[in-house]
Image (cartoon, rainbow, N blue to C red):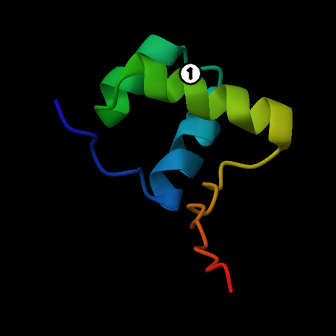
Amino acid sequence: MGRSQELSEFKRGTVIGCHLCNKSIGEISLLLNIPRSTVSDIITKWKQLGTTATQPHKMTERVSAS
């Protein structure tokens, strides 16, 4: 099973909006058709960091020895 695409900023914001309207994780999951674990992760990140923005992918830099 491959990794699926990340959610758009709009969809992550919609999750938080539903959460603020007292929808349960299960209700949000059904409403937006995304896994419960994803909904939970988005809400947890928002509570801890105050944002739903994704982290930039770290690129490794190759340093050549001279």
- In the picture as drawn, the residue positioned furthest to the front comes out as 66
Residue 10, position in %: x, y?
A: 50, 58
Q: Amino acid at mark 1?
A: Ser
Q: Secondary structure at mark 1?
A: helix
Q: Quadrant of residue 33?
A: top left
Point out the image quarter for the C terminus. Answer: bottom right
Q: Left or right: 44 with respect to 6? A: right
The one nearer the camera, 64 or 28, is 64
Residue 60, position in %: x, y?
A: 58, 66
Name the residue located 58 percent from the left edge and 74 percent from the top edge: 62
Q: Quadrant of residue 61?
A: bottom right
- How many labels sit on residues? 1
Q: Is residue 5 above or below residue 44?
A: below
The residue identified by callout 1 is: 40
The one nearer the camera, 46 or 65, is 65
Residue 4, position in %: x, y?
A: 27, 44
Name the residue located 56 percent from the left edge and 20 percent from the top edge: 23
